[in-house]
Image (spheres, rainbow, N blue to C red):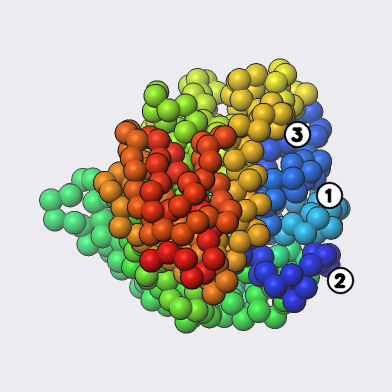
Amino acid sequence: MAGSRPKDSESTTGRLWWRDGVVYQIYPRSFQDSSGDGIGDLEGIRRRLDHLEWLGVDAIWLSPCFPSPMADFGYDVSDYCDIDPMFGSLDDFDRLLADAHGRGIRILLDWVPCHTSDQHPWFQEARKDKESDKRDWFFFRDAKPDGSLPNNWLSIFGGPAWEWDEEAGQYYLHSFLKEQPDLNWRSPGLVSAMHGVLRFWLDRGVDGFRIDVIHRLLKHPELRDLPVIPGREGHGYGGLEHVHDENHPDVHASLRDLRKVIDEYDERMTVGEVYVTDPNITKDYYGKGDELNLAFNFALVHAPFDAARIGDEIARFDALVPAEGWPDIVLSSHDAPRHASRFDHPRFGDDRARLAAMLLLTARGTPFLYYGEEIGMRQIPIPEDRLQDPLAWTLHPNASRDGSRTPMQWEPVAGGGFSEGDPWLPMGDSERRCVADQREDPASLLWLYKNLLTLRRASPALMSGSFRRLEAPEGVFAFERLHPEQRAVVALNFGEDPITLDLGGGAPIGGLTTTYGAFLPPDLSSVELTEASGLVALTGASSGA
Ligand code: GLC
């Protein structure tokens, strides 16, 4: 089929969307409900494209919307080539894609290649029939001769990674829930079926994929036992050295094959969830520019609100990403507490979220925004009887990710403009914080996001300039982005006191401050920053030190 394609391309704009642009993550259950069942859907997202176009994002990433029993809210896929009726139909998807493309907005799907749902027909066939070619698409194993589990691996979501299956007469491996059996990427049949899945969506016109837990795609061929970390016996998952169940070197050959499929199409891309905290490992997933286009750097999701720590992480990743690669920057996602809450401080209101927005949209790399962060949505407390995330019972109620997945707050009315029905998770107080109100208020966080996005899109230095950290007093992270045509300097005061600093001179020809109404200094040799505030200033390429 001739799929939908966006109205522009790198050859018409000079910008490559996933490198020079900004991606916005949507959790489909929580963005906009159009059917009144309290759960967001694709038609709802389509109706809200105006907001995304106005904001100025280049692409949206949809968390999974494929048919699923929803044991892990869509990360348990029972059909990779369709849409769950809860979210709509393939026709709805095509309509959304065409409408987004008409506005120059790309769409990334969330591809979950490491495991299926136990309800997927592949698994159903495999468990029933030992002779089926699908049997080898999963990991079915007998107990060890002494009757113990096939190996000592544990599930990330708690308990052993092996589940006994009566029908199969064997155990099967699951790195997450028992409803999510792991797929075997050493089986050629599975690999070609999965490549077929990618082509199915690429042919439809999808612009790329966020790839789930890519660092666990390949395991040790013999599924060897994991060494126990000395002194950490009995510490569960964290007590094992994960040398055979993740980051297996064979993953790179699989990624190179995958990249070939992506590169059969024009201007498509992949961004991989490499959920490790060591960027030395993350960087390997770029290969020599022939593996992932982007590998998520999660370091900032775990970093405190501290100039030195955040500066170190950004500088470290920037230096590690290979020359053929490109960094990215992420503060929040559906798996972590929202950063506006992580960074919250009673003295500062939205100031720290404003500073974070400037960091996200001026550092070198593709920014990933998480829906709602543009209005400073916070974690919403979820009463125990309304918890939805399975982690609440497989691990602990505090491990629930529900608080960062609550419905988007659009309007200051009951239901928040999200749904006419009863929202699947409690809504935050949309009378205190919502899109409609912030659009009326030029001093709002929403307008700061929009202004930063506009500035970024027009600035070659912010989009593609090099990164260099600048000397700065304690509590301040400052850096330069240099492009042959333009220089941008950014200074962010994470501290609790005002500060004056020298950013090397030169008169700004444009820029922004996080404080509404504050002026840029006439000369960068003397810059005053109040507590929890920052600025980005553009100058000609030759100005400054
Ligand atoms: C990824 C997803 C997470 C999911 C897990 C299992 O980490 O981001 O939401 O629970 O994979 O699929």
Percent across and percent down for residue 199 are 72, 72
Q: Residue under label 3, please give it.
A: 33
Crowding at dot 3, Cα within 10 Å, few <14 / some 14-19 / many 20+, comes out as many
Element on which disc 1 rests: helix
Question: Considering depth in this image, is 293 or 112 the residue closer to the camera?
Answer: 293
- Which of disc 1 and disc 3 is earlier in sequence? 3
Could you tell me how far apart the alpha carbons at marks 2 and 3 are, in whole angstroms? Answer: 29 Å
- Which of disc 3 and disc 2 is earlier in sequence? 2
Inspect the image, locate mark 3, and give the three-letter code of the amino acid beneath it: Asp
Percent across and percent down for residue 415 are 71, 22
**Left/right of residue 512 with respect to residue 533 in the rendered view:** right
Q: Quadrant of residue 247?
A: bottom left
Residue located at (48% from left, 46% from top): 521
Residue located at (42% from left, 64% from top): 544
Q: Is residue 155 above or below residue 416?
A: below
Percent across and percent down for residue 467 are 43, 66
State whether label 1 is within 8 Å of ligand 1: no
Q: Is residue 269 above or below residue 525?
A: below
Q: Is residue 216 above or below residue 425?
A: below
Percent across and percent down for residue 67 are 70, 49
Question: Considering depth in this image, is 279 or 28 the residue closer to the camera?
Answer: 279
Q: Quadrant of residue 258?
A: bottom right
**Left/right of residue 304 with respect to residue 412 in the rendered view:** left
Inspect the image, locate mark 2, and give the three-letter code of the amino acid beneath it: Met
- Which of disc 1 and disc 2 is earlier in sequence? 2
Q: Residue under label 1, please give it.
A: 92
Could you tell me how far apart the alpha carbons at marks 2 and 1 are, in whole angstroms? Answer: 16 Å
